[in-house]
Image (tube, rainbow, N blue to C red):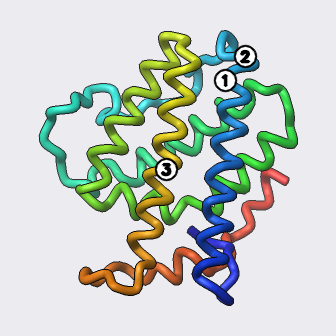
Amino acid sequence: MSAYLKASPDRARRKVRDDLEIATAIMTYAIRKNLGGFHFSGIRIPWIIQSWQADEKLPDVETFATEVATFQEHLHERIASLAHNQAMVRQMWKLNEKTRQFRELELRRPETAIDILNKTADLVNALFNRNAELCSTILLQCAERRYSLLVELVSPDKSVKLPRLDALLFTQPKSSGSRN
């Protein structure tokens, strides 16, 4: 994730956890407030989410990672908009921007991509079925998975060489300018 201080990995992890909790709280609140107003109009559900089944073999992650990460952003923004609160929507834009690289990284790891596809397909179905409780549970599970992955990636005793996580954690996102 980006836009976090270089000073301390522990502080950065706390800030990431805070951001994950804020995003989850915004979406959970919005779902509870107005799930009946949710629609997928204007959001293209990626082919892999439309056809994904839990026991399916994972295709090459490069065929879907960016598309699914972009879909997640659009979905998060649409969910936040249910609250009819522009401050919450703007906060979701900022959180999406800060977490974009991390979400793409987690989708490019086959061991996490399967869970992401399962949870994203489940969330889409829960939204279609207007099941607020299941939506909230899935969002909480996704936040916990992301935080656990972050802790794993920055652990000093990791044996696997990973992409430069510090570049994901400690760089400022490019300003989009169009959403402020």
Q: Position of residue 61 (x, y in %)?
A: 26, 54
User: Mark 3 or 1, which is nearer the eye?
Assistant: 3
Q: Position of residue 162 (x, y in %)?
A: 33, 79
Q: CA distance from mark 3 to mark 2?
A: 24 Å
Numbered tag placed on residue 34 in the rendering = 2
For the C terminus, the quadrant is bottom right
Numbered tag placed on residue 31 in the rendering = 1
What amino acid is at disc 2?
Answer: Asn
User: Mark 3 or 2, which is nearer the eye?
Assistant: 3
For the N terminus, the quadrant is bottom right
| N-term mark: 3 or 1 | 1
Q: Quadrant of residue 105?
A: bottom left
Do tag 1 and tag 2 residues touch (Cβ < 8 Å)? yes
Residues 24 and 36: in front is 24
Q: Residue at x 80, y 41 (%)?
A: 88
Q: CA distance from mark 1 to mark 2?
A: 5 Å
| N-term mark: 3 or 2 | 2
- Would you call the spot at circle 2 few (<14 residues within 10 Å), some (14-19), or many (20 or more)? some
Q: CA distance from mark 3 to mark 1?
A: 19 Å
Element carrying mark 1: helix
Q: Would residue 19 appear left or right of 44 to someone viewing this image?
A: right
- Would you call the spot at circle 1 few (<14 residues within 10 Å), some (14-19), or many (20 or more)? many
Residue 113 versus residue 172 in the image, above or below: above
Q: Which residue is mark 3?
A: 144
Residue 156 versus residue 132 in the image, above or below: below
Element carrying mark 2: helix
Numbered tag placed on residue 170 in the rendering = none
- Would you call the spot at circle 3 few (<14 residues within 10 Å), some (14-19), or many (20 or more)? some
